Image (cartoon, rainbow, N blue to C red):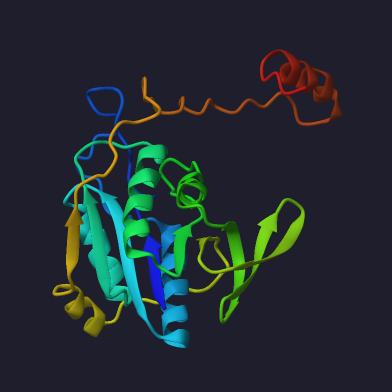
Amino acid sequence: MKIAVCISQVPDSTTKIKIGSDGKTIDNQGVTFIINPYDEFAIEEALKLKEKTGGETIAISVGKDTVKETLRKAFAMGIEKGILVKTDEIMDSYAIAKNLASVLDEIKPDIIFFGKQSIDYDSSQIAVMTAEFLGIPSISVVVDLQITGNAVRAEREIEGGKEVVESTLPLIISAQKGLNNPRYPNLKGIMQAKTKPIEEKQPAYTGNKTETLNMKLPPTKAKGKIVGTDVTAVPELVRLLKEEAKVI
């Protein structure tokens, strides 16, 4: 079985983000980049499936040469091969999905794993768009997965409960927290990661569908206000919620 997992490089969630001088991108100075945390669930599920059925695993990403470090982190977990669509351009979700679909159509994996979303843009778009470009089914926000032969049974989160979806290979799965517990790289995996191959490809598609006009940090949180300590403060509290906070 050929198993692909699409991963992205994102700023560490503990990093203090600053806006770049262009006002449209973040300032990368001093920023630590990591594998998107949701993609770690995708990597683990790919590795579990390989251990069960055999075959090979391939990690795919889009971005600058520095993304190779993120691919090598996937190697350290156990992924065998890597493909980087190398570009210095900042691509939107549509362009990334188009380029991933081009690579996936070429290598024709039996199953493709994504994280449910990236923690930087939080769009949750790329997995479903890639599936649409490839013309194959997609099951998102998956918290339990069973594959028997060509048959797939997935449990996914929905508002207020869970939903069971059945499908067949090939298809795309986007992983949610709870699907598994990602393994930690061991010393052997870290050493082997240095020599595993990364194939570079040029983008098959350029040109975004969206444009970032500006980027800004959220406003500084206002100081709290104490309007009273007993029931006599209720009328003033209601007034403030209506007139200042405008939440009621």
Farthest residue, direction right: 231
Report whether residue 12 is seen: no
- Above or below — where is 114 with respect to 196? above
Depth order, front residue of 228/216: 216
Query: Is 16 on the left or on the right of 84, as rendered?
Result: right
Depth order, front residue of 166/91: 166
Report whether residue 52 is seen: yes
**Residue at (65% x, 61% y) in the render:** 156
- Above or below — where is 91 with respect to 14? above
Residue 65 location in percent, x, y?
16, 51
Residue 116 location in percent, x, y?
51, 54
Query: Is 138 on the left or on the right of 87, as rendered?
Result: right
Question: Quadrant location of the C terminus?
Answer: top right
Residue 7 location in percent, x, y?
36, 57
Residue 163: image quadrant is bottom right
**Residue at (39% x, 55% y) in the render:** 36
